[in-house]
Amino acid sequence: MSNVQSCYQCGKCTSICPMRRVSKTSPRSSIYNSNVYGLETNGIWTCLTCGLCPMECPQQVDFLTFVREERQGKRPLEVAHLGVFTEFAELSSKLDGARHQKSDSEYGYFPGCVDQFGLFLHDVKTNFGEITTSSMKLLDKIGIKPQIMDMKCCGHDVLWQGKKDVFDRLKKYNIDHIKESGIETLITGCAECYRTFSKDYGLGIKVVHISELLDKLGLKINADVTYHDPCRLGRHMGMYDAPRKALTANGVTVKEMEHSKENALCCGVSSFMNCNEQTKALRIARMNEAEATGAKTLITTCSKCLAHFNCLKTEKDAVKKYDIDVVDLSVFLARQLEAGK
Amino acid sequence: MKGSVAVVGGGIAGIQASLDLADSGYKTYLIESKPSIGGVMSQLDKTFPTNDCAMCILSPKLVETGRHPNIELLGYSDVKSITGKAGDFKVKLIKKARYVDETKCTGCGTCTEKCPSKVPDEYNAEMSKRKSIYIPFAQAIPRVATIDAAHCLYLTKGKCGVCKKVCGPKAVDYEQKDKEIELNVGSVVLAIGFKPFDPSILKNYRFDHPDVITSLQFERLLSASGPTQGHVTKQSDGKVPKNIAFIQCIGSRNPRINRKHCSSVCCMYATKESIIAKEHDQELDITIFHIDIRAYGKNFEEFYSRAQKEYGIKYVNSRPPEVVVNPDNTLSLQYEDFTTGDLITMNYDMVVLSIGLDPADSARALAESSGILLDDFGNIATSIENPVETSVPGIYICGVAQGPKDIPDTVAQASAAASKAAALLCGERGTLIRERKFPDEKKLSPEPRIGVFVCHCGINIGSVVNVPDVVEYAKTLPGVTHAREMLYACSSDSQSTIKDAIARNDLNRVVVASCTPRTHEPLFQNTCREAGLNPYLFELANIREHCSWVHMKEKERATEKAKAIVQMAVAKSALFQPLYKQKVPLINRAIVLGAGVAGMTAAIDIANNGYHVTLIEKEKEPGGMLRDMTELYDGKKPADVLRDLIRKVSENRNIKFLNEAKLIKVEGYLGNFKGIVNNRGKEISVDFGVAVIATGARNLEPSGLFNYGKDPRIITQAQLEKMLGTGVSANTITMIQCVGARNKEREYCGRICCVDAVKNAIRMKKANISTNVYVLYRDMRTYGVTENLYEKARDLGVLFIRYDEERPPKVQGGSVVVHDIMLNEDIEIASDLVVLSTPLVAGENEEINQLFKIPLDKNKFFLEAHPKLRPVDFATDGVFLCGSAQAPKLIDEAISQASAAASRACTILSREFIETEGAISIVNEARCIGCGTCVAVCPYNAPSLYDVTVKVEEVTYSTKKSKINPAGCKGCGSCAAACPAGAITAQHFSSKEIGEAIDAFDKGVRSISIEKQIVEVMV
């Protein structure tokens, strides 16, 4: 249950809202209309669920829960990529899925949907699958040989798109799958999966984001990078230090952007929704901040952020030529590992 | 039982509690952890809502505390533990080493001047530097230097030692050690105050930027004794800011950082600071960003309204989430304009963070050793019906340590705590105290030998008036044998200087040219008396209020005027003769008017202090407004509280309760009143020494407002309160706040209506969660810890809709149409009940104000002697005030005030006699024609006529003559001015004395030969 009734309309949320910089949205007003009059506002759909406003709210109003609850059963204003990923999840939720099987390892690794991205996002010119292969290499280096978990989508996007029924079906299958496997720790390379397994599943086993394991690789990398905190890993889960440590412990210098950690700006698109002129402006703002650090590489730990930044870079009529590589953390480290061999 | 009390904390609360206890005959230890007493109030520039100079009203209290024979001041001492039980506590404390012998140090300041080590000055909120050996501020008490051991070069590195070398009286002692002291006392009063919130934990507000400062720092910037001598400048570049933003609720109303409470004072201090800043610089643009403006106290709403209308201060209902430091290092704020929905970015030269009040660090430690409990907010826990009693009997609490509150509420609680401690120890009263001893008065030599002391008052006078020039001029005046300047004439070292000058120069008249006699005359008179001079040989020349403050921009002319004022005082003082106070017996009994919760509490407290009380109630049943209440805001039943109070009244043998009674006549004066009470048609005479007025107030009947009276569905909050006793069923209930308040006709805020509304909204929801409860409000004023009720109401789903004064809701039967300013749309709420929250209005106070000649304010509530420091006193001695008769207030506040009034009354009742004024009027009987004019004009009932037989040679006739009762006379001079026969002399202000002063002004103006037109300006 969200606690929007605690809101006393101070307006801090609206003033700090990244979407407000590029649109007329007002979380304050969405809360008011819903709480006092039971009215639905577009604000619940324009929200990127980036989690910045609850950080500031003096009354600790849980705006994320509010938005998620309000969305349930309603039609999103827009879903990017023709809603194909949503269709995919819906379909998969109704299909049988892979057979549950016992794992040989105490560790399980879930790649998420990165391997399907390539099917639809050719224009982004990013090898999303490399995230999985890189993760395997890195885990191998530190002596972890996980079972690859052949599960369905974690359900993150459908949950935030208001399709709880679909999410529940996916969740049920996945929980059974994990239980049957007998693993004790579930590793994921995806910020969204990490959030969803940690907060929305109640698995009862350890869930680890791969960045938590990478500070002991023993690499000596001489490079300056900047790091973008994905909202799911950062504000949703409070994980700011692990990815940075994974870089600095391996010799990398991290140059912080103007807004980082708790205050990090959003990549602009959430749950494959809201890809439009306004959110593009946010992506530009974020890329400009990254560029301003002088680093030649922008590291992130979320495949969606990766897609969105690279999409901006590789557009046909690009707004700007960004001389900066956008790379997933595991991919970056694995490439260095390879280069050092 | 011990007849002594330890008061922990030397802010205004501790000071007031100590003075009350000491005046009531108890040995009092005042323990303060800082080098000087004075607390945060000593750092304030002015106080709201009257904009009185804080130091000017505080300083006389500091001095009085420092010199009170029954108060032992333990400065720079930390309490380590409190153990024991009521009547017998052990208080362990560490007297920290000052490295200066307090008994030897004169506070001359030479060491401070020579000390080479500079450290941030806490008194100026770290915006300037002080030395490692220092006296915190000019008016500090005790005025002794303290070495900051953490920074002193000698104590840290073994180098330097300059202070020891330059110290004349050899007071510096590097070998001094912390000393553990154990006090054995009968009771403890905790007055540990608060800690200003540290905004650096809210990183988004960029407190690291030099132009983002706290409200306390801004207060210091405004103060003449502050780091910039009262000029508001930017810390970054020293330039004058053109626009300033205040952000409210920094560290308050923020559960996210565990600050759930409203700090109660920030809205008003931000308003005050804005007004003062605007007075300094009219071009300045000030915006206050807020959630609700909580202007709930007496005259607060009026102050808030003046800030907007007269000073053009902008109030914006929106909260900027961060201070943005731009690339060029300037500051901007971004906020949502709720009316247009626009996001606005504004640049500001300076941002002031209105910081809240955190519990003091020592609260937790003290709680652990003594076993007292803390509440959810970290304050020392109390209850509504016992607002100054901690969970440990014999340990009392007052001030902000009990919950956020402003100065008058703090002072009232301090007196209340003193009353409780005094009542506990009443059998031991007077056992551990000593009389104030003065040297014999010296013989007055025939020739006047006048000493003149001209005060800089920091820069209050010195920056406008050329003080050395005035001193030189004074030396040339007839009769003046000594003249000198002083930085602060009121500081304790100045008192020694004056006494010393009296002795050395054999002075027999003293003139201090400084500020108003209203606050400072007793101090200087006492100094004269300590030097063997009759106190009436002293005169104050007011060159601050009458000169430097009103002629700031005309420095030269102001200096000439100051000279003239001094000359007048000198001429007048030459004629002064010694006058003597008389001792008059007093009646050690009290009356209390009104047996509501305040009146009963006051009566019980006075009775528990050992004095007889007559409690007079006009109704048949005691209880007042509490009888109509069905639940207190903490859930307790008023009937239980009432039953307990009535039991205490009826069981106490010192209390005589008269119901269906009314005081109809009063004569007499402090200590000796004679009253007639009409008790069910029978007249009873009651003699008493003091009176407490606790006659309460009544709920406004909103006839004609919102169709009240035309439809049974439209009721008042008071009616709902009553109905809730048996339960109310409604599907939808809509409350409208500020009905008949905060408008042109009735400007004040009702203070308690928001708390009442929220409380009853919660009750409705608790009875049936599916009831729709709407509260239509302008600002939610659930101040202090009552903020938790507002939270709770919201949690239960009560809906709050803000409306604007200009577009009030419309009520037609059960339909309420409100213009929702958040939506900017009219909304109709179909309601089963419409509840109008109306304020309390004054009762029949006019009768009582005539009986006692005590004043009313413009809303017909009683007017206290001083809105800050004398909240339960009247200007008329011997009459005290409490409860809603003074202004609307919550029940716990009324109880605190009632105990406070009892304490103030006991400071009189505990005396063996009353000392009269010395400067009173006298009648020359030979000239008196017995016309009775004096009797008619006297505001204090002092003169009366008596029959005499006059024998003139062979003729004898009967006539009347006037006689002035010295105990009643206040020396106001009305009778002397009105007497057609010139038979009355107002001593100390005789025609001759005043005439000489006027003549001297005339002479002075000529002798200083200034241009004629200037004289016209000044006269």
Image (cartoon, coloured by chain):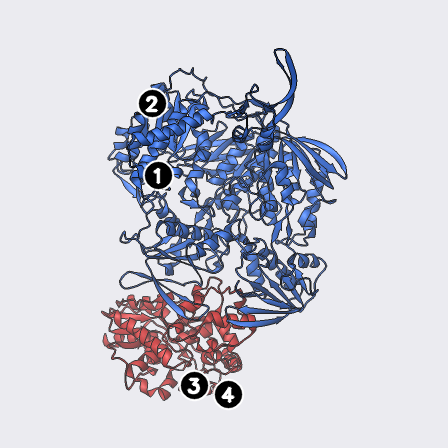
Q: What is the C-alpha distance between the residues marked 1 and 3?
A: 90 Å
The chain that hosts pointer 1 is B
Could you say where residue B21 lies in the image, as x and y percent from the top left? 54, 33
Say few, some or many: other residues with alpha carbon within 10 Å of mark 3 (under 14 / 14 to 19 / 20 or more).
many
Could you say where residue B515 lies in the image, as x and y percent from the top left? 40, 35
Residue tagged 1: B1016
Q: Secondary structure at mark 4?
A: loop
Q: Which chain comes out blue in the rendered image?
A: B
Residue drawn at (50%, 83%) of the image: A75
Judging depth in this view, the residue of B970 and B46 nearest the camera is B970
- The amino acid type found where label 3 is placed reads Phe
In this rendering, is residue B890 above or below B970? below
Nearer the observer, disc 2 or disc 1?
Answer: 1
Residue tagged 4: A96
Q: What is the C-alpha distance between the residues marked 4 and 2?
A: 114 Å
| B410 left or right of B157 in image | right
Residue tagged 3: A85
Q: What is the C-alpha distance between the residues marked 3 and 4?
A: 18 Å
Q: Secondary structure at mark 2?
A: loop
Q: Colour of chain A?
A: red
Q: What is the C-alpha distance between the residues marked 2 and 1?
A: 25 Å
Rendered image: mark on residue B478: 2
Pointer 2 or 1: first along the chain: 2
